[in-house]
Amino acid sequence: MAKILFVLTGASYWTLRDGTRHPTGYWAEEFAAPYRAVTSAGHTVEVATPGGVVPHVDVMSLRPSMAGGEQAALDQEGVLRSAEELRRPLRLSDARLQDYDAVYYPGGHGPMQDLWDDADSGRLLVAALASGKPLAIVCHAPAAMLATRRDGRSPFAGYRVTAYTNDEEAAVDLAARAPWLVENELVNLGVHFERGEIWKPYTVVDRNLFTGQNPASAAPLAAELLKALGASG
C-alpha cells in the first residue's frame, strides 16, 4: 500500500488587495474526498504544513450551500473529525519525498497566502515533478507552483495544468479584491492552462502531474491518483 503526503496550507486568512484579512484555510471537500478515497483503498496519509501548524478548515466550505448539501457537509465534517493526521502535521521542512509514493495538495484560498512563496514547498514540488511519482494539486493549490521559480523559470512551464479559474473567482465576488489570480499567474509561469465549465469537475493529467479545477474536481482527481498508484504498484 502507498504512503501519500498531503501538503496543506497553514494560513487562516488571505490578505486581500486592500490589506483586509479574508478568513480562509483549506477547503473541506478538497481534503475530505481524496482522504476518504485513498484511505478506503488501504493507503496511508501524512499531513505536512508550513511550520507544522495545525491546518485551519475554511468554515465557509462546510456550509451546506458550499459543500453540496446538508448531508455532504455533515459527511465532510465527519471525515475532518476522524482524520487524526490533521491534528499532528509534520513540519513541511522535515518532509522527505523519498518517504512517500505520491504527493497531494488540496486548495482553498490559504495557499495564496503562504504556499505560493514557500521555499520548502517549492523544493518539494520540484523534486516530486522530477521523481515521476504522482503529484496531484487541486483548485487554488496550483498557486504553490509559483514557488518553484528560479531565475524566472519553473520546471512546470510547458505542462498542461488546470486550476481555479478567473471566472470562478469572479463568480464568488473575489476576483476584483484579490491581489492576484491563480489562472493569470500560472499562465505567466508558462504552463498550458486548460479549463472546463465553472463549478463542474474537470481534471488534467500530464505525465505525472494531476491537476483539478475546483472543489468538485477533488474526488475525480483522487480517482486518477488511485489509478496511477495502482499502475505503479
Image (tube, rainbow, N blue to C red):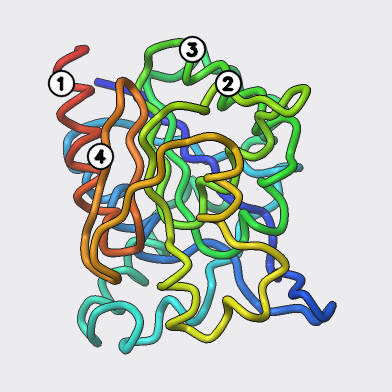
Identity, as a three-letter code, of the amino acid under mark 1:
Gly
- Above or below, comparing residue 230 to residue 116 in the picture: above
Numbered tag placed on residue 38 in the rendering: 4
Which numbered disc, 3 or 4, marks the residue closer to the eye? 3
Which numbered disc, 2 or 1, marks the residue closer to the eye? 2
Looking at the image, tell me whether mark 3 or mark 4 is earlier in sequence order. Answer: 4
Quadrant in which the N terminus is drawn: top left
State yes or no: discs 3 and 4 in contact (Cβ < 8 Å). Answer: no
Question: How far apart are the two marked residues, 2 and 1, measured between alpha carbons?
Answer: 23 Å
Could you say which is closer to the camera, residue 144 or residue 187?
A: 187
Numbered tag placed on residue 230 in the rendering: 1
- Above or below, comparing residue 228 to residue 224 in the picture: above
Which class describes the residues within 10 Å of circle 3: few (<14), some (14-19), or many (20+)? Answer: few
Q: Position of residue 212 (x, y in %)?
A: 33, 49
Looking at the image, tell me whether mark 3 or mark 1 is earlier in sequence order. Answer: 3
Numbered tag placed on residue 126 in the rendering: 2
Say which element carries label 4: helix
Question: How far apart are the two marked residues, 3 and 2, measured between alpha carbons?
Answer: 6 Å
Identity, as a three-letter code, of the amino acid under mark 4:
Val
- Above or below, comparing residue 5 to residue 12 in the picture: above
Identity, as a three-letter code, of the amino acid under mark 3:
Ala
Question: How far apart are the two marked residues, 3 and 4, measured between alpha carbons?
Answer: 23 Å
Residue at left 36%, top 34%? 160
State yes or no: discs 3 and 2 in contact (Cβ < 8 Å). Answer: yes
Numbered tag placed on residue 130 in the rendering: 3
Say which element carries label 3: helix
Question: How far apart are the two marked residues, 3 and 1, measured between alpha carbons?
Answer: 20 Å
Identity, as a three-letter code, of the amino acid under mark 2:
Val
Which class describes the residues within 10 Å of circle 2: few (<14), some (14-19), or many (20+)? Answer: some
Rendering quarter of residue 31: bottom left
**Residue 89 visible, this orientation:** no
Residue at left 80%, top 82%? 20
